[in-house]
Image (cartoon, rainbow, N blue to C red):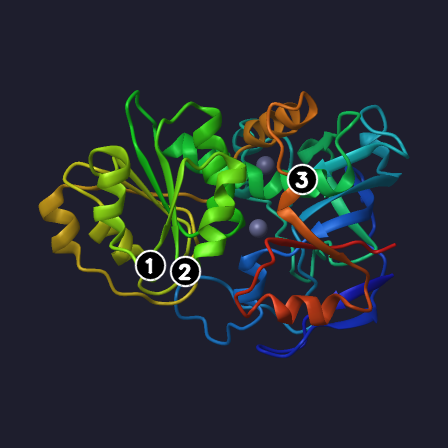
Amino acid sequence: MKAAVFKAPGAPLVIENVPDPEPGLTGLILKVQACGICGTDLHWSEKSDAVGGWRNLEPGAVMGHEFAGEVMEVGREARGDWKVGDRVCAMPQIGCGVCQSCLSGRPHRCAELKNRASSELTGAYAEFTRIGSSETLLLPEGVDFRQGALVEPLAVGLHAVDRARLQPGDTVLVVGAGPVGLSVALWCSFFGVRHIVVSDLAAARAERAAEYGATAAIDASREDVIARFEAISGGPPRVVFDCVGAPGSLQIAIDYAPIDARVVVVGLCMGADTIFPAVAFVKELDLIFVFAYRKPDFEMTVDMLGCRRIDAASMVTDCVGFDAFPKAFEGLKIPGSQVKVMLEPD
Ligand SMILES: [Zn+2]
Ligand SMILES: [Zn+2]
């Protein structure tokens, strides 16, 4: 099959033929119809040292974890649950399906976890990819493959908002208006937060958040973020989401947070970073880290897309085939006007 293959840190992906994936006993083979490019993959493809706690990519790895498509092949033990032709999306991880972690919808905590973009499991920047029977969800009619490929980033936002333990009257500052920030704004709006203020160093990006439920935008390159926030909402934010995940962004979120606030770290910084704990200490902040999601986050996202209670289709700003994909991937490393760019293998 065709796939976009990682070669070396900082080098563009190369379209090559790689072995077709096998479904195994319990897996399914998905014909990928759409796969979003994630900021994690952009950072990951540049990373060349193991400092920071995130594994390096091996040359030959195929990334891609935000996908939807059609079931092409069903492993023998999954045949009662799935059939060829089913339109689905899936959690990118594959667990054993029967342990406590898997049964609670957290395959990424399974002792037998298969990680994508590794030698045992290729990602979905490819024509086909293997998915787990227990981690797969049927797409409702009316939810197309592009929206199906948005389920993963939307589930990240839902899990982050869940972790924030929102209370009545909470006001929210979202730092960073990339796909993760937009997704967090969308779910804060869904759950009825009155003030959802999104800041970004690019005014146009921040303003775009209004489409996803943000109630105000701040141009962090020109404005004093906290002074503006207070002018807008009448007080400081109770919850600050760091949706940037670059060195320095966590300290910025800590600096923005007032006494007793919650700082929710959603953006993933893969390298070493410095924070000043005393600042968070004196404010007695709750620092909450967010990793991935649980299956119920996927289920709720699919369900809410299906009944049109949420709409994120406009997040998809470009779709390309294999030929244009490596260039589109590199292009996203420079901040621009794109939100979510997808590979459409056909
Ligand atoms: Zn992602
Ligand atoms: Zn398991």
Q: Nearer the viewer, mark 2 or mark 1?
A: 1
Up-down relation of residue 263 to residue 82 (above or below): below
Kindly check if marks 1 and 3 are in contact, taking CB atoms under 8 A apart as contact: no
- Label 1 beta carbon less than 8 Å to ligand 1: no
**Near-viewer residue (33 or 103):** 33
Q: Nearer the viewer, mark 1 or mark 3?
A: 3
The residue lying at 30 percent from left, 32 percent from top is 171
Q: Position of residue 227 (x, y in %)?
A: 21, 47
Residue type pointed to by label 3: Ala
- Residue ID for mark 3: 313
- Label 2 beta carbon less than 8 Å to ligand 1: no
Q: Quadrant of residue 51?
A: bottom left
- Residue ID for mark 2: 269
Kindly check if marks 2 and 1 are in contact, taking CB atoms under 8 A apart as contact: yes
Q: Position of residue 135 (x, y in %)?
A: 67, 35
- Residue ID for mark 1: 249
Q: Quadrant of residue 14?
A: bottom right
Q: Quadrant of ligand 2?
A: top right
Name the secondary structure under disc 1. Answer: helix
Q: Position of residue 282 (x, y in %)?
A: 9, 47
